[in-house]
């Protein structure tokens, strides 16, 4: 379970891309691709909806693998989680996520041992 908590504190286990991958669910891949295409104004295909989790080995969505600035920062600084970063409390990228998702903030506090 802990591995399914992303660097930013979001729960990858609740992400439709992860769920579709874990269950090889093509209906959910199609639904997720359609929704994400609409939300992001780009074409995302069902074949691109594959992710085993931000911090797990294996396939990730294009966004998680190459575009997520939070993940890139944590990996480059060798932090297993943003909760371990001394700059987490002042990080504007991280606060965009946790400001919209209090559970992510709670997950990061657990990583810190609070």
Image: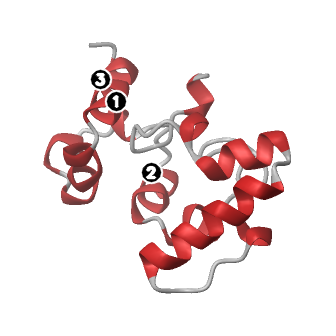
Circle nearer the viewer, 1 or 2: 1
Q: What residue is shown with label 3?
A: 109
Q: Furthest-top residue in view?
A: 114
Residue at point 40%, 57% (across, down): 70
Q: Residues within 10 Å of mark 2 (few under 14, many from 20)?
A: some
Disc 1 to disc 2, C-alpha distance:
13 Å
Disc 3 to disc 1, C-alpha distance:
4 Å
Q: Residues within 10 Å of mark 3 (few under 14, many from 20)?
A: some
Horizontal and vertical percent position of residue 95: 21, 50
Identify the mark nearer the N-term, 1 or 2: 2
Q: What residue is shown with label 1?
A: 108
Horizontal and vertical percent position of residue 108: 34, 29
Horizontal and vertical percent position of residue 81: 44, 37
Q: What residue is shown with label 2?
A: 74
Quarter assignment of residue 82: top left
Residue at point 79%, 50% (across, down): 58
């Amino acid at each position: 379970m802990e591995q399914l908590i992303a660097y930013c504190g979001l729960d990858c286990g609740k992400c439709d891309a992860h769920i579709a991958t874990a269950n090889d669910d093509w209906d959910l891949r199609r639904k997720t691709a359609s929704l994400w295409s609409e939300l992001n104004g780009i074409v995302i295909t069902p074949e691109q909806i594959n992710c085993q989790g931000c911090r797990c080995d294996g396939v990730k969505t294009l966004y998680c693998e190459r575009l997520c600035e939070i993940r890139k920062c944590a990996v480059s600084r060798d932090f297993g989680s943003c909760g371990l970063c001394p700059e987490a409390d002042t990080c504007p990228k991280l606060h965009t996520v946790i400001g919209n998702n209090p559970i992510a903030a709670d997950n990061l506090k657990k990583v810190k041992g609070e």
